Amino acid sequence: MESERDIQHFDDIYKHIGQCNQYFFFSYIIVSLCVMSNAWNSLAVVFLFPETDFWCQVDQLDEQCLDLNLTEVECILLKNDYRPTDQSSTTLNEGHCSQYNFTNYNFNINEPLRNVSIHSCNSGYEYDTTQYKTSVTQEFDLVCEDAYLVPLVISLEYIGALVGSLIFGNFSDRYGRKKILLVCMLLYTLLNIIILSSQWYLMFITFRAIAGAFSMGAYMSTFVIGCELVGPSRRSLAGTFISVQWSIGYMVASLYAYLIRYWRLLMLAMAIMDIFIWIMIFLLVPESPRWLHSVNKVNSTDRILKKACKFSKDPQANFDACQQFCRQKGDDFTPETQQSPSNFKTVDILRLKNIRTRFLMIAFIWFVNSLVYFGISLSVVSLGANEYAANALAGFVEIPAVFIAWISIECWGRRIVLSATMILAGVACATTSFISNDVWVATLGMVGKFGITASFTLIYIVTAEIYPTSIRNTAIGLSSMIGKIGAIIAPQILFARVIFEQLPYLIFGGLAIAAGLLALLLPETRGLNLPQTLKEGENLG
């Protein structure tokens, strides 16, 4: 009987307390809410900087509206008639960024406009507030010659996330998953509240970039602690459900924006929900027992496992077995055998041959996933729906993608499915470059989004399972950092359409296919114990 309770590896604990222990499962559900928060805070940028119709503020036209006693809608129609060009699109063109010189113009005799000179807007701009009552774009006049400031804030936010993925990945390995999660989530929530008082755009983009760093730190810690709270047979489901939470947050962002048309109130509503989630995590979620065990915090590990054992069939016997394992490892814990993350540096990922090779392959796959994912997401408006529906649909299509990915990896393994989903996304993206039918382009775009979402879900799982506990969060942080480079340059690749219309999706397709083929060289990790030490990580597969 005693041999049946012998525990040689931390993953063996789950054979006694359950692969999906009720206490850990409840904690996992609560902590995964942080991912929803990350999603709606990140994707709200679509609604903070919407492309709305605008035109020059012309005092003479306002006077004309008053003289003719026109309604608001009639006045807008009048101003449209007196634009230098008759354009209905929201792109920055002459009809939006210039005006006629009406200084000596006589409206009563309907003087031909071809005789009137044109100059740039000199009295500011007016905006169509039918859909968005206020937005950051409207408030800071981010149009015409200042339009480049809109993509700038998106790039800076991703740069902040890039820095955060490196810094907080290492901090999480050193100081604990929950502690870093709580600190990062609290700080990005406070920064979002501070942004509400922004009176200058420089203040807005500065705090938005810093918040991006803390948001990424919270996201990575959430993913790692979520995967570490469940046993090996449920780990892929844990990673999948976190991706579903992101998709739900994606759609919730659309709901928030649909209900709240004022950008400051929109951010305030999201911040209030973030505070509520933070309090739940603080009160109800334990530190990762796997991390506590890896740094020899025996008493803390015992305390958490004792709670988990209460939900097993034989609580006391199971806890005794778990405690014996933890105490035994604690007795063997010496400076020479210590596996604390604080003893490791980032360079250790590159020191061992197999870990180094896998890191380089995984880093490239991360880069391509991020590039293609955000490239497709930023061009989702091509679906032709309104922004709320398009954004919600883009989020909805991710849910079946992550579930099918989870079912598939349980049947065929991580490596094959990761490769297949990336190749699917690549073929779909590349094919859009050779067809002109709008319906088929939109359909293939969604197929590409489906494939790249599935692969994005899997690359987190593969990364978490390939690296040992001592460097796991650091490795995920580094990989995510490289992935953020893809997110940063995705808008620039989309801009390459001015050179060749089909070029962006040809690039997305080619890189996705290449990354999919490279994924076949990674080791298969289905059903294996998570490696604890560098030696176990080096010998994996």
Image (cartoon, rainbow, N blue to C red):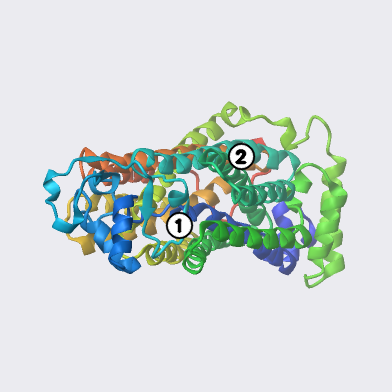
Q: Can the viewer see residue 310 in this picture?
A: yes
Residue at 64% in and 44% down: 531
- Horizontal side of residue 464 vs 121, given as left or right: right
Name the secondary structure under disc 1.
helix
Q: Which residue is mark 1?
A: 47
Q: Is residue 386 left or right of residue 274?
A: left
**Marks 2 and 1: which is nearer the front?**
1
Q: Is any part of residue 19 visible from this angle?
A: no
Mark number, residue 537: 2
Residue 523 as seen in the image, left or right of residue 431 = right
Residue 314 placement (x, y as % from top left): 82, 71
Mark 2 lies on a secondary structure that is helix
The residue type indicated by label 2 comes to Gly
Furthest residue toward bottom: 313
If the image is split into quadrants, where does the C terminus sit? top right
Q: Which quadrant, please, contains the N terminus?
A: bottom right
Q: Earlier in the sequence, mark 2 or mark 1?
A: 1
| The quarter of the displayed image where residue 32 is located | bottom right
Give the image location of residue 39, x and y in percent. 53, 56
Whole-angstrom CA distance, mark 2 to mark 1, is 43 Å
- Quarter where residue 538 is shown: top right
Residue at 22% from the left image edge and 64% from the top image edge:
439
The spot of residue 285 in percent (x, y) is 74, 59
Name the residue type under label 1: Phe
